[in-house]
Amino acid sequence: MSAELSPIVSEFETEEQAASYDRWFRAKVQASLDDPRPNVPHDQVMADMRALIESKRTKRDAG
């Protein structure tokens, strides 16, 4: 049985949950690092998101 963790110390209820999340998170980070696709510059992502938000706002205001 896993020891319970204090909510002040951890957002997880048990050490087992914390360890499980840590393994999942590390696997996601490693998968991202191993991804062969080219990186997208931050400025490009921000420009794309601003355009998406504006298009949604325009559609909402028109409808």
Image: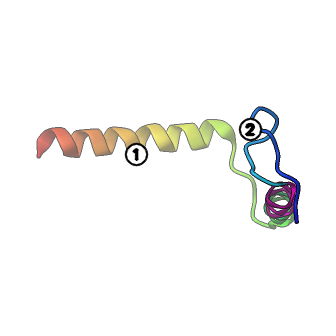
What's the residue at 50%, 44% (across, down)? 48
- Density class for disc 2 (Cα within 10 Å; few <14, some 14-19, many ≥20) is few
Image position, residue 46 (x, y; %) = 56, 37
Closer-to-camera residue (17/42): 17
Asked if residue 34 is positioned above or below residue 43 in the image, the reply reads below
Residue extending farthest left: 63
| On-image quarter of the N terminus | bottom right
Q: Are marks 2 and 1 in contact (CB under 8 Å)?
A: no
Query: At 82% from the left edge and 63% from the top edge, which residue is drawn?
Result: 20
Q: Is residue 39 above or below residue 9?
A: below
Q: Give, as a three-letter code, the residue at label 2.
A: Pro
Task: Give the mark nearest the N terminus, 2 or 1.
Answer: 2
Q: Position of residue 12 (x, y in %)?
A: 75, 49
Q: Quadrant of residue 11?
A: top right
At label 1, counting other C-alpha atoms closer than 10 Å, the crowd grade (few under 14, some 14-19, many 20 or more) is few
Left or right: 63 in relation to 50: left
Q: Which residue is mark 2?
A: 7
Residue 31 belongs to magenta span: no
Q: Position of residue 22 (x, y in %)?
A: 85, 56
Q: Measured along the vertical axis of the image, is residue 51 above or below residue 14?
A: above
Answer whether residue 20 is magenta in the image: yes
Circle 1 is placed at which residue position? 52
Q: Position of residue 31 (x, y in %)?
A: 82, 66
Name the one closer to the observer, 12 or 27: 12
The amino acid sitting under disc 1 is Leu
Q: CA distance from mark 2 to mark 1?
A: 38 Å
The numbered disc on residue 11 is none
Q: In the rendered structure, which segment of residues is drawn in magenta? A: 15-24
